[in-house]
Amino acid sequence: MHEEFAASLLHQDDQVYPQIKGQTDEEKHVRFNVYRNNVFVSLIDALADIFPVTQQLVGDEFFRAMAREFVQSNLPTSPVISDYGQGFADFIRSFTPADSVPFLADMAALEQQLLTLTHTAEYPTLDHEQISMAFAQVANPGTLQLSLLPSTQVVVSNFAIGSLYLAHKNQQHSTIATLTLNTHESMLLAKSGLYAELRVISPAKVVFIKRLLEGRALGDAIPDDEHFDLGASLAKLIEWRLLTHIN
Amino acid sequence: MPSFAQPSQDATASSGFLSSSGVSLKPAYYHEILNTLPALGFFEIHAENYLSQGGPARHYLYKIREQYEITAHGVGLSIGGERLLDKTHLARVVQLVNDLQPAVFSEHLAWSTHDQGFFNDLLPVAYDESTLQRVCDHIDQLQNALQRQVLIENPATYFEFNHSDLSEIDFIAAMVKRSGCGLLLDINNVEVSCFNRQADPYDYLDTFPTEAVGQIHLAGHTLDPNPSVPLKIDSHDQAVCDQVWALYEHALAHMGDRPTLIERDGNLPPFEQLLAEVQQANQVRSRIRRGQHHA
């Protein structure tokens, strides 16, 4: 019985109408439409909450039309609505009307990743004093192993979506207008407080952080790159509260 | 009929939940609540919004739990669904209830999940024997998992099924008897559903199995703009209206005082407005308690 109901909800057909009390088909339609409307509006609103920057990039009307198409063939698989939208970035990639915004799918993937990260458990990190002590205790700091928050991720995009995301989030409208978007960008995603945070980082820092995440010792993680500044990079890891252990 | 511990009157006799009304917990209010510690009985959460391992919602909920009682309201278990409750989801809800020890866990007489996925809405069930048995099986599954009695809420509906052969009241009464669940009486849903099927909400309240009611919801609704069939929509985005306040007073006069929630999910007003509605509910409850005392 729910089969017909579900099909009529999603596909605007009337196979459920014989089950509904009403004088006319028009009355049945109006009554059933309350549920149709609730389902679509609530799920489109949920996507708008999860992908606010994606929405800003294309505007409300375009976003809601695109989201409606997604909802129709991609209902949430869990009642935990903050987990919704896993396939949204891939859907955008194949959604032809969005082709004129080539970085839209990457932005959606980024927003999804940040939200998922925000919902992971909090994890204690080392403070300034603990880090200084660890460094003071060894003769050769190059042998130290620096462990980063296990959820730390490095993302590389063909577009400057990290800068674009931050400019939208901080409502820097003048920055948005001057951004060069058609350029590679590397980003660090990490959660050291209640929320995941995004930082745009240099390609050399990407190599450094990836090597630390692989478990290499500090001396072995330093990239062969004249622009890399070890002191400044370590200072950032400390400032961003990414270190969990030093052995 | 299985027997579970009901929300303990003794353990919570001096607490807020039984004596003072509460409001829905929304992220927009977290800071104000923690900074001002407003005088109210409890906060109600939607369980599905608090199932993550970390993040701000969970953090602020547990801070607020240190100061207040909490009631947990499930919106996604799909009690009226055609398949057994999702075990993975149920396990997460059980974990939340164990961690949080809410005064009440409630769910809806509705379904929301089918083979295609989760519809994020409370969809109506037919009132017949096979649905009754299925709903009771699912309530059993839930009560066994939580090891406590749950309250089931009367629905807001926009049509009736042709093949319903029980009234909503008879269905709910049989559900209580067969499953041992309690009831959450949503007075706004009574107004909305009765309006939408042109029934008398006072008759509904007078025949409702009120002895099983463990909590009341009060909320606001809107009028659907379609021109052909007048419908009220259970939108939770307005203040409680005068008709619902009048029904509330009538219901309490009939069954005595009950813990009460001001339920608000959208178009969120300044928090003081919700507190004023809490006070209005508390005034009705005080009058009822005084009346009972003198009787």
Image (tube, rainbow, N blue to C red):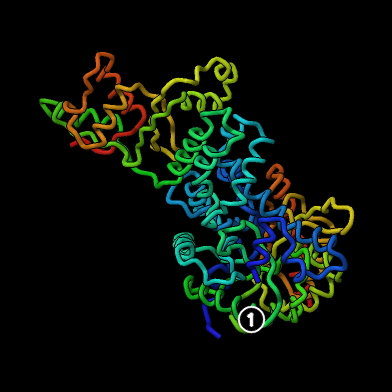
Q: Residues within 10 Å of mark 1 (few under 14, many from 20)?
A: few
To which quarter of the image does residue B83 belong? bottom right
Q: How many marks?
A: 1
To which quarter of the image does residue B42 belong? bottom right
Q: Nearer the viewer, residue A139 or A46?
A: A46
Left or right: B225 in relation to B252 = right
Q: Chain of mark 1?
A: B
Q: Position of residue B136 (x, y in %)?
A: 59, 78
Specify whether residue B118 is in view: yes
Specify whether residue B72 is in view: no
Q: Position of residue B250 (x, y in %)?
A: 82, 69
Q: Position of residue A44 (x, y in %)?
A: 63, 46
Left or right: B20 in relation to B292 = left
- Vertical side of A149 occupied by A27: above or below: below
Residue lying at 53% horizontally and 28% vertically, measured from the top left: A102
Q: Position of residue B288 (x, y in %)?
A: 77, 69
Residue lying at 28% horizontally and 38% vertically, measured from the top left: A244
Residue with the most extreme left position:
A139
| Quarter containing the C terminus of chain B | bottom right
Q: Which residue is mark 1?
A: B130
Left or right: A74 in relation to B266 = left
Residue lying at 42% horizontally and 29% vertically, measured from the top left: A157
Kind of residue at badge 1? Ser
Q: Nearer the viewer, residue A4 or B203?
A: A4
Residue lying at 21% horizontally and 24% vertically, measured from the top left: A222
Q: Nearer the viewer, residue A13 or B72?
A: A13
Left or right: B14 in relation to A4 = left
- Vertical side of A10 occupied by A88: above or below: above
